[in-house]
Image: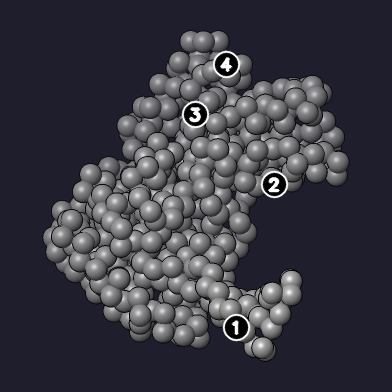
Amino acid sequence: MLKTTYPYYLANEPVSANTDLAVTDKFSGDVATRVALADAQAIDKAIGLALAAMPAMRAFPPFKRQAVLEHCVKRFRERADEMAMALCIEAGKPINDSRGEVTRLIDTFKVAAEESVRIDGEILNLEISPRAKGYHGYVKRVPIGPCSFISPFNFPLNLAAHKVAPAIAAGVPFVMKPASRTPIGALIIGEVLAETDLPKGAFSILPAHRDGADLFTTDERFKLLSFTGSPAVGWDLKAKAGKKKVILELGGNAAAVVDADQGARLDYVVDRLAFGAFYQSGQSCIGVQRILVHASLYAALREKLIEKTKSLRMGDPKDEKTFVGPMISESESKRLAGWMESAVKAGAKIIAGGKVDGAMFEATLLENVARDADLYRKEAFGPVAILKKFDDFKDALATVNDSDFGLQAGIFTDSLAHAHEAWDTLEVGGVVINDVPSFRVDNMPYGGVKDSGLGREGIRYAIEDMTEARLMVMRETW
């Protein structure tokens, strides 16, 4: 269970400044714990101490960075049950999904530990013309400077880890703002980091209300802002970020395409589609929102998917049998219900689910959703998916691209030609063949195009953003 109160972490140290932030159990609605909330003065102090920590962090050698990350892996394994239950309570995430996220947290820190000792440079041959005879170039990667991290509510552990772990590997100090609805996971990470010998000021983890956290975006002492969250907020932050580098991991309305040759394995396809659409109540930016099915398979897949959707158990996320828990808040549930009702008024049909009770939103399938409907055009971020048939594979790819978003897409096909055509054609950050777009492994480059963001996460790719190339030119003969 959760502790009664949690401090924030300022320059590696726990600070019980207040208990102003109430964190609720998302299923019961009761206050589960209280957390120290940072004000502008604390945030400013953290930034100053992060800047002061830069010389020590640059001097903190790779083997020590690796040791810090390995310590985290060990402690996260020891505290796995505690962390999973905390996640289940603060996010309303079903306990099995919560355990899975703890596993991914551990994987992410393991990969970072490996990458921390292989941040390499290169030797350049500059003798491309007579004037450069005797000159050689040497490139190394150096830490970019203090970084600002803002993490979201839906993966409070692992999406925080995708910022924290590469920062430690790269040797950059950071100040993190976890989502105020789900701060506990990041604070437990801070508790573990505080056990290490990271230089003072290397990290601060400061829950703060959005309207009081402008310094995370505007302060020029930060050299990088990494934000994961909604597109509207992300692009607004980019506009305010000034000269710093900005990495945005934003939303999507991901599509999965089921090709005509999938008749022999429809059961597998349906299982994966149901998982991708409804796991953790659909609150994933790569959750399956649009399902495009070849006309020859549409009726059979539709029947199986309806049956599968209706079988998913909704309820208390602490129950081992629960698959669909609450959405993050009743207001988010009402927002999505409004989109669904508008789509139905315009001619859509609910073919499974559709019931809403507070923050509980039943796993729901619709068909005949108009392409200009909010439920089609925007990010649902809830347990709703849309079925649509197609006759021609090229038309299906064009439909996938008919979106302001471009994070990931899934293609179920036995055709190597179709797999490559999708890879060449789809305007997304990643194409997943024979699985849902919701698939992610924590060392792969992950990110989107269009309104889905800028840059890539995945440890090695994040390290590249958190470091910069520094060139030395040497004239060795004259």
Q: Secondary structure at mark 3?
A: loop
Instruction: Give x and y (percent) for residue 360.
Output: 40, 34
Q: Nearer the viewer, residue 119 or 360?
A: 119
Residue linked to disc 2: 432
Residue under circle 3? Answer: 378
Crowding at mark 1 (Cα within 10 Å: few <14, some 14-19, many 20+):
few
Q: Amino acid at mark 2?
A: Val
Q: CA distance from mark 3 to mark 2?
A: 21 Å
Q: Looking at the picture, which amino acid does disc 3 mark?
A: Lys
What residue did someone put label 1 on? Answer: 474
Dot 2 falls on a residue whose secondary structure is strand
The mark that comes first in sequence, 3 or 2, is: 3
Q: Nearer the viewer, residue 117 or 348?
A: 117
Identify the residue at the far left of this view.
Answer: 18
Position of residue 366 measured from the top left corner of the image (x, y, whole percent) = 57, 22
Q: What is the secondary structure assignment of the residue under circle 4? A: loop
Residue type for callout 4? Ala
Measure how far apart labels 1 and 3 are at the Cα level.
Answer: 54 Å
Are the residues tagged 1 and 2 within 8 Å (C-beta)? no
Q: Position of residue 75 (x, y in %)?
A: 43, 76
| Marks 1/2: CA–CA distance | 45 Å
**Is the residue 474 above or below the residue 341 in the image?**
below
Q: In the rendered view, would you say 99 is above or below 283?
A: below
Residue receiving disc 4: 370
